[in-house]
């Protein structure tokens, strides 16, 4: 299945290209819009795309990129894809949209940039990289992504996707790996009504806290290291609630709030109160995680979905060996947003095709159980051809 034909079929279903509008300017043809999205989303670039298709010039692609591809239109198009996919019968077997995970995917950066940083664990000591932090639902659709520096702790951006999400998905349970864990994130998620359930490595090295030093828990007493000062977060409770309301109403960027809390002075009683509150929530989560095998499986399953989506993104982002050759932040952001759109379109197309196959099997008398369907994923990608000569004649 060629990527341009896949996008055309998906657009026939949900009309996501209608989100690309600019006041005062007539929209380009659908063929030009799809070619522009593929040029950015595959990292091919508009110059190479202009040489890889007939009837579409570089000037047409440049015009569409300049006037019709921006943060608002790409978010609106992605929202159409995510909302449409959410209501598909097969997607409902994978999840309800109330559970999600977030993780960073690293990409090599060939030019020096403020976002770029050295990342020896992945790219050696001489090449810079950046990270694309993506939020993925339990239905496999990516509902938010953000370009961040590898220098920054991923926990700064956990709340951004949860609070700035405008899709029909409203996650109430969120998972990350250890990179997204801090005491403040536990506290803020609790205040926002979101259950933060990360996978934490080296659990034996984690510190557990209790509220009352005089309270004893039998054989579990040896697990508790310290007692939190509950008077502190009782004293600051009103301020903590105000902060939660401000975040909910989008009065301040979540990553800015989390970063300021992380860098607060030791004497800052509000930051200390949030830390104390977060330690109690984290302790409860760790004890549940140790005891509940089903919870551990649920967390691991959702994180595996995020990793599977990374593989799909790597397959589609093929050009220039999947490296960013330009350090311009706007261009990088547009490329990652277009890549997210291509991934969501592939997930939607796979889901629709899988539904048709299931209907054919059932109509022929074969038994296909829902519990078995819940174990198959729409993240297959080897049948999708993102490169070659593009054909937009049917658009």
Image: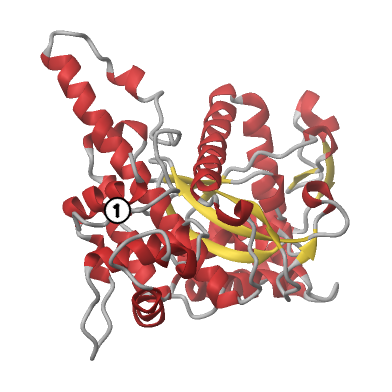
Name above or below for residue 226 compared with residue 130: above
Q: How is the image coloured?
A: secondary structure
Name which residue lies at 23% across and 30% down.
Answer: 355
Name which residue lies at 46% across and 59% down.
Answer: 41
Q: Quadrant of residue 204?
A: top right
Name which residue lies at 40% across and 47% down.
Answer: 141
Farthest right residue in view: 125
Farthest bottom residue in view: 24
Could you tell me residue 128's position as x and y percent?
A: 77, 62
Front one among 28 and 143: 28
Name above or below for residue 358 compared with residue 179: above
Viewer can see residue 31: yes
On the picture, is 30 further left or further right than 390?
A: left
Name above or below for residue 69 compared with residue 376: below
Front one among 85 and 322: 322
Front one among 374 and 75: 75
On the picture, is 161 further left or further right than 156?
A: left
Quarter of the image with the C terminus is bottom left
Name which residue lies at 82% across and 47% down.
Answer: 121
Could you tell me residue 342's position as x and y percent?
A: 40, 53
> Label 1 belongs to which residue?
391
Q: Across the whole image, how many numbered discs are drawn on residues? A: 1
Viewer can see residue 244: no
Farthest left residue in view: 363
Could you tell me residue 58's position as x and y percent?
A: 40, 74
Callout 1: 10 Å neighbours few (<14), some, many (20+)?
some
Could you tell me residue 33's position as x and y percent?
A: 30, 67
On the picture, is 59 further left or further right than 253?
A: left
Quarter of the image with the N terminus is top left
Q: Secondary structure at mark 1?
A: loop
């Amino acid at each position: 299945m060629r990527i341009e034909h896949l996008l055309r079929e998906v657009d026939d279903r949900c009309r996501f290209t209608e989100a690309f509008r600019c006041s005062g300017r007539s929209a380009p043809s659908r063929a030009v819009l799809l070619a522009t999205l593929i040029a950015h989303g595959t990292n091919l670039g508009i110059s190479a795309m202009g040489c890889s298709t007939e009837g579409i010039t570089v000037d047409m692609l440049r015009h569409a990129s300049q006037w019709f591809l921006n943060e608002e239109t790409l978010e609106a198009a992605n929202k159409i894809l995510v909302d449409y996919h959410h209501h598909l019968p097969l997607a409902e077997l994978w999840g309800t949209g109330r559970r999600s995970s977030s993780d960073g995917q690293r990409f090599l950066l060939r030019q020096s940039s403020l976002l770029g940083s050295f990342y020896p664990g992945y790219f050696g000591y001489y090449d810079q990289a950046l990270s694309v932090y993506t939020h993925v639902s339990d239905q496999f659709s990516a509902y938010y992504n953000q370009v961040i520096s590898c220098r920054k702790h991923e926990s700064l951006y956990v709340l951004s996707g949860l609070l700035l999400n405008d899709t029909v998905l409203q996650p109430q349970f969120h998972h990350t790996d250890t990179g997204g864990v801090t005491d403040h994130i536990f506290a803020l998620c609790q205040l926002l009504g979101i259950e933060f359930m990360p996978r934490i490595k080296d659990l034996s090295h984690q510190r557990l806290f209790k509220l009352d030093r005089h309270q004893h828990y039998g054989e579990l007493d040896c697990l508790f290291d310290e007692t939190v000062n509950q008077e502190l977060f009782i004293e600051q409770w009103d301020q903590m609630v105000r902060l939660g309301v401000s975040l909910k109403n989008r009065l301040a960027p979540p990553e800015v709030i989390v970063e300021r809390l992380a860098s607060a002075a030791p004497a800052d009683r509000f930051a200390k109160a949030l830390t104390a509150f977060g330690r109690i929530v984290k302790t409860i989560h760790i004890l549940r995680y140790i005891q509940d095998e089903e919870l551990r499986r649920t967390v691991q399953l959702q994180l595996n979905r995020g990793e599977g989506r990374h593989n799909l993104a790597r397959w589609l982002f093929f050009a220039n060996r999947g490296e960013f050759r330009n350090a311009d932040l706007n261009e990088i952001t547009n490329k990652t947003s277009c890549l997210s759109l291509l991934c969501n379109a592939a997930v939607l197309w796979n889901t629709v095709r899988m539904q048709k196959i299931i209907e054919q099997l059932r109509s022929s008398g074969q038994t296909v159980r829902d519990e078995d369907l819940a174990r198959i994923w729409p993240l297959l990608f080897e049948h999708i051809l993102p490169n070659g000569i593009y054909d937009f004649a049917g658009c």
